[in-house]
Amino acid sequence: MTFKELTAARYSVRQYKDKPVEKDTLAAILEAGRIAPTAGNRQPQRILAVTEPAGLEKIDRCTGCRFGAPAVLVVCYDKNECWVRKYDGAKSGEADASIVTTHLMYQAVELGLGTLWVMFFDPAKLVEEFAIPDNLVPVSLLILGYPADNAAPADRHFQRHPTEKILSWEKLSQAY
């Protein structure tokens, strides 16, 4: 599958089979997150792999968006490990965690899993449930599992802005 085919095939899965994700499959997905690029190669990503029933119950207390999936990757960044932009002090953590989540997501899809990138969760509750240290900031939950036979993309999945709306060549201020 080419990258273009992979990105076209991926959609937000909200129905999963009651089938666990194999450890070697999960290991391959996690490796994609480990080698993902980060600002200055600082590698501030920290990933919590949740597959046990007790952990999944904790996830359910933090979000209503697990949809019965058998695995969740909690993607965080270590705010003490981020690259910092010298001009304004902005930290790379959220961008780095998002790049990592994207790599995890596409590797999962290539391996036949369905995914749902979730930002709709209670971060304070997540920190409490998993005793996440103060230096780690949760950014996303990547819901993983085998799509149910009747899983399908939402109608809005196919709605895309025209290129002219999202792209401007050198004259950004004039485009908006």
Image (cartoon, rainbow, N blue to C red):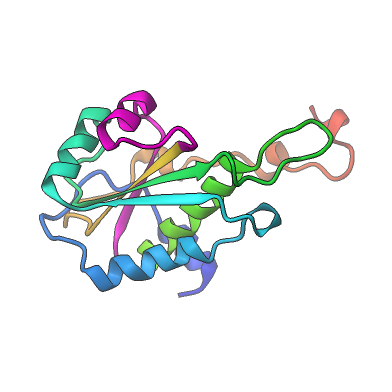
Q: In the rendered view, does 14 fall on the left or right side of 164?
A: left
Residue name at image x 49 percent, y 36 percent: 135
Residue name at image x 36 percent, y 24 percent: 124
Task: Relative to 61, say whether 79 is above or below.
Answer: below
Q: In the rendered view, does 161 fall on the left or right side of 60?
A: right
Which quadrant of the rendered structure holds the N terminus?
Answer: bottom left
Percent x, y of residue 21: 21, 63
| Magenta-tinted stretch | 111-137
Location of residue 121 by image quarter: top left
Residue name at image x 35 percent, y 31 percent: 127
Which quadrant of the rendered structure holds the C terminus?
Answer: top right
- On whether residue 131 falls in the magenta region, the answer is yes
Percent x, y of residue 166: 69, 39
Q: In the rendered view, does 46 fall on the left or right side of 164?
A: left
Percent x, y of residue 168: 80, 41
Q: Nearer the viewer, residue 16 or 149?
A: 16
Percent x, y of residue 17: 14, 55
| Badge count | 0
- On whether residue 116 falls in the magenta region, the answer is yes
Task: Relative to 24, say whether 166 is above or below.
Answer: above
